[in-house]
Amino acid sequence: MKWGKKQTGNETNENPEVLEEGEKIGPDSNAEIEYELHEWAGETRLVLDQLLILNEVPHVWQGATLVVREEDEQATDQLIEEAESTSLPTLESDAETIEYETSGWSDSEQTSFSSLLVRLGIPYEFNDEGGLVVQASDEEAIETALDAFQVVNDDRPELDGLDANSLLTEVFVSCDRLRRDHRDDTGVGEILRLTPILAQHRPPFGIEANQWDEISKRAIDLVELLSEGSGDEEEIKSQANGLAEILRSMT
């Protein structure tokens, strides 16, 4: 890949950006080095950015131009070589693709997930709208990676397996009561007690994050119907029945 490098003075960064480490490259910095990386693939720049962060090299991006301090030139040159040598799988031109919505992700989340896909050898690219584009043949691998990534980045406390099974059984029992009688005092009391536990814990091992979050969302919706009086008998019973059937399918 081609790239250019030039030295600049302090005047190039009148509006410095804040870095991941909280440092700045600004008017008070020493001379800076600019790396023109416009011909690089966006994924390769993401790899380089991750390497710079991991090696604590202060830097900013001005579009596809990387700016570092002159004192970090040697370290940056080495990391650029490392990024260039990284074998990045690319999407096949004639392959069927699918897109995942990731426009709401932070830059750090996008960079971390990109690094995960590189390690897994899964070809991908981000389009102009911020969507993650992958080959349809890799859908299962992407779903697994997304699920693992979501769990790793979930800072909620985890339930152990026994507690999770017990919790889901209790939720099922309360829903089973409510789909029979929407005013069942025990069913109402239990779903009100159990729903915050569901929502405040991350998925236990063996249960997919999306499935756990769907159960939590349905339980929250049911609690809202019961608490606010906004749902009639049939609506409450239908919501309880839907959640019960999801839980039944997991056994």
Image (spheres, rainbow, N blue to C red):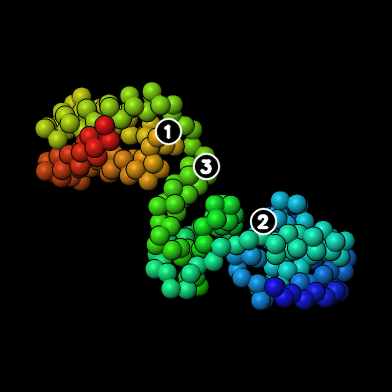
Residue at 36% in and 40% down: 212
- Disc 1: which residue: 204
Q: Position of residue 218 (x, y in %)?
A: 28, 43
Taking the spot 60% from the left edge, 68% from the top edge, the residue there is 42
Q: Tag 3 or tag 1, which sits nearer the N-term?
A: 3
Q: Amino acid at mark 2?
A: Gln
Q: Disc 3 marks which amino acid?
A: Val
- Circle 2/circle 1 CB separation < 8 Å: no
Residue occupying image coordinates x 24% and y 37%: 249
Q: Which residue is mark 2?
A: 50
In terms of image quadrants, where is residue 84? bottom right
Image quarter for residue 209? top left
Q: CA distance from mark 2 to mark 3?
A: 18 Å
**Residue located beneath label 3 in the image:** 152
Q: Which mark is residue 157?
A: none
Q: Quadrant of the C terminus?
A: top left
- Which amino acid type is shown beneath numbered disc 1? Pro
Q: In the image, residue 41 lies at what x, y percent?
A: 61, 70
The image quarter containing residue 219 is top left
Side of 173 relative to 84 (left or right): left
